Each structure stands twice: as structure tokens, then as C-alpha cells.
Amino acid sequence: MFRVDRDVLAEAVAWTARSLPARPSVPVLAGMRLEVTEEHQLKLSGFDYEVSAEVTLDLQTGDPGVVLVSGRLLAEITRSLPAQPVDFVVEGAKAVVTCGSARFTLLTMPTEDYPTLPAMPPAAGRVGSDVFSSAVAQVAVAAGKDDTLPMLTGVRMEIEGDTVTLAATDRYRLAVRELKWQPEQPDISAIAMIPGRTLADTAKSLTTGAEVEIALSSTGGTGEGMIGFASAGRRTTTRLLNPEFPKYRSLLPTEFSSHAEIATSAFVEAVKRVALVAERNTPVRLAFRGGEVVLEAGSGDEAQAVEVLPVDFDGEEINIAFNHQFLLEGLGAIDSDVARLQFTTSTKPAILTGGKPVDDGGTPDYRYLIMPIRLSS
């Protein structure tokens, strides 16, 4: 049916297998579809009715045809093959994979039972793949993990002209990132609610090409239906969530009573150390005053930890407490050597950003809002 380089095939199979369901509702959805076209291209695809993935490879030689085999098994096999060309041949109800002296025989599944992959929606615009991957990672960290609240498990994408705004919240923190892109239509306006885990995985896996093409089934309103992403011969689609989302902009404070700037790596290490004595739901307490911040965890009869770090602090002294895991995830997302924390009061959300404030007085590209934990008096 076809011959292809082992590394090329293994990478393509592994990428496609990511979208296969761990527990498919029907056995055929565990399959990976391989099609050799008349144009000597190999298309590998997977689909579970929610997410589709397809990668296209150019072949030197191949006979047109379609076959469906167990995707996860094929991924395991191709990953373990020696570094030699791979021959893939269909013999009746079986597929034979040969590489060097290794030979595997796979049972095939009925291709007529496999669902048709959704068509790619119309292209809406393009963005640099590295920028997109970084932005999605920064925001997806705040997406909810509770599937009983689906509106909080997604990342909201707002498109206005050449600006894309990504936002996610789990009610305890909120992450917002703005980035520029190249829209197909300069006056485009759209909203899409994308499953957070799927978007994060997709953005990370599409960095092999220079750009990612974003395609929306509806660019004139809420973007209900489907969104697609394509880069370097890979394309994936996913169904969108209900676009309902909290009015998050009203949650972002615009005035602050104090702010602190602190070396990110030192802050991260100190929080990790102090948090060693913190029970799962107990906070890490931070006391900002003068040129230092005192980190504390534990109290009373429990194990306790205290550490002091130098800080560039300006404004009213403040004692505030945070869930240490949420704080660490925010510090990991800012992608800056300097962390900037802005406060209003000890009971109101703080804003975490990277580096110094922007010169023109505008807002940073990335903001991470974190709710404090009320301290008992």
C-alpha cells in the first residue's frame, strides 16, 4: 500500500493517536484511518465525534486505498520500529507492517462503519505558532477541571480585528492574554468557547510549523459549532462549548493601593519550600512591608515554615494569603524574570503580571488574577 520513513511515520501516527478516546463509545472509534490518495499522499486521521485530527504526508510511492486499524497499537508499534523504511501492506482483512526484520500483522476494522471527518471550517486568520502555544499555555492553566461546570472548563477566545483575547477562570483565579494575529477580514468579530484541555494540547502540538491557521464555523457572532487549527500538514477540529462565560473584565481591578516586584525564580523556590508544611487547603501567608516579604505557612500545633525575601515594594503594607498551588501556577505562567504583584486590600483579588509596568501606561499582554484566602483574625 505504501512505503515511508520510520521517523516520519512514527511522528505522524503518534500525533494522530493523541485524539483517540481512551474508552471509545463504539469500538470503531479506537481506529486510525490511513488513506493513500491518487496524489501519492498518506492521510492519517482519528475522530471521536468531538475532536478530529488529520496529518498529511507526501509519499514517494504508494497504491491508493483506505484501511482502518487500532490507532494506539499502531502508535506503539511504529514507536518501537528500527530506523529503516516501513512497508505497510493490506492483505485481505489484515494489515502487515514490515520494517527491517520486524514484521507485525494487524487486524483491520470495517472502514464503512467509521464516521466521516468534519470539513475544516473557513479560515479566519493566522498567528505565529510559538506565540499561540505560549499564550494558550498561559491561559489554560486557569481553566476549570470540574466537568460538571462545563462553562468553566473552556478557554474563551474573543476576536476583534487584529487582536485575539484569550481568557479562562475556575472561579478562584482568572488568566487573560492578548495577542496580535493576521485576520482574513480586517473587521472580523467573533467569540468561541474552546475546551481548555483540547486547546492546550493542540496549541502545543502545532509548533512544528511557523504559523497556525485558525478556522471558525461562524465568524459573525458567537462562533457556535466548530473551530479548526492547521499547521505544517496537520489539522485538527473540535466542537465548541456553549459561549456563556462570566463577565470577567469587571473582575480585573484598575486601581491599586500597593505593588511589589520580586525575582520570579527566588519567589517560586521560597513558596515551594514554605508550602511543604501547608496542608492541602491551607494557604501560604505573605506579609509585604518595606523592602521584604515574609512567607509563612502552618500555625499553632502544626509544622511551621517562615522565609524572608527581598522585594521592591511600594504602597500600603499588606498581609495576604493564597492557595500556594494557584500562586505557583501563576508564577510559572508569567514567563518573566521579575514577578509584579498588585494589591488593593487583603480580601480582594491581586493581579500577577510579568516584569515592569508597560511604558505607555497601558495594560500588560498577560494578567493573572488570584483570589486571596481570608485569614482568620
Image (cartoon, rainbow, N blue to C red):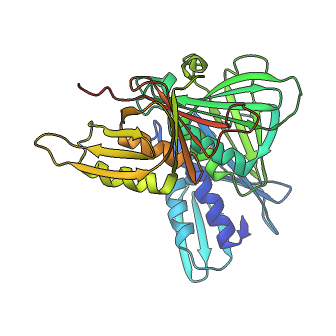
Compared to residue 129, the image places residue 155 above or below, namely above
The foreground one among 146 and 261 is: 261
- The residue at the point 72 percent across, 31 percent down is 362
The foreground one among 336 and 197 is: 336
Query: Does the image show residue 21?
Result: no
In what quadrant of the picture does the C terminus appear? top left
- The residue at the point 53 percent across, 42 percent down is 29
Q: Can you name the residue that lies furthest to the bottom here?
A: 101
Compared to residue 176, the image places residue 334 above or below, namely below
- The residue at the point 60 percent across, 39 percent down is 199
Query: Does the image show residue 265?
Result: yes
The foreground one among 127 and 319 is: 319
Compared to residue 98, the image places residue 316 above or below, namely above
Horizontal and vertical percent position of residue 213: 78, 42
Query: Would residue 163 appear left or right of 262 to someone viewing this image?
Result: right
Query: Would residue 286 appear left or right of 363 to someone viewing this image?
Result: left
Query: Would residue 340 appear left or right of 282 to someone viewing this image?
Result: right
Horizontal and vertical percent position of residue 9: 66, 65
In what quadrant of the picture does the N terminus appear? bottom right
Horizontal and vertical percent position of residue 109: 55, 49
| Residue 212 falls in image quadrant | top right
Horizontal and vertical percent position of residue 300: 13, 39
| Residue 99 falls in image quadrant | bottom right
- The residue at the point 44 percent across, 42 percent down is 290
Compared to residue 27, the image places residue 99 above or below, namely below
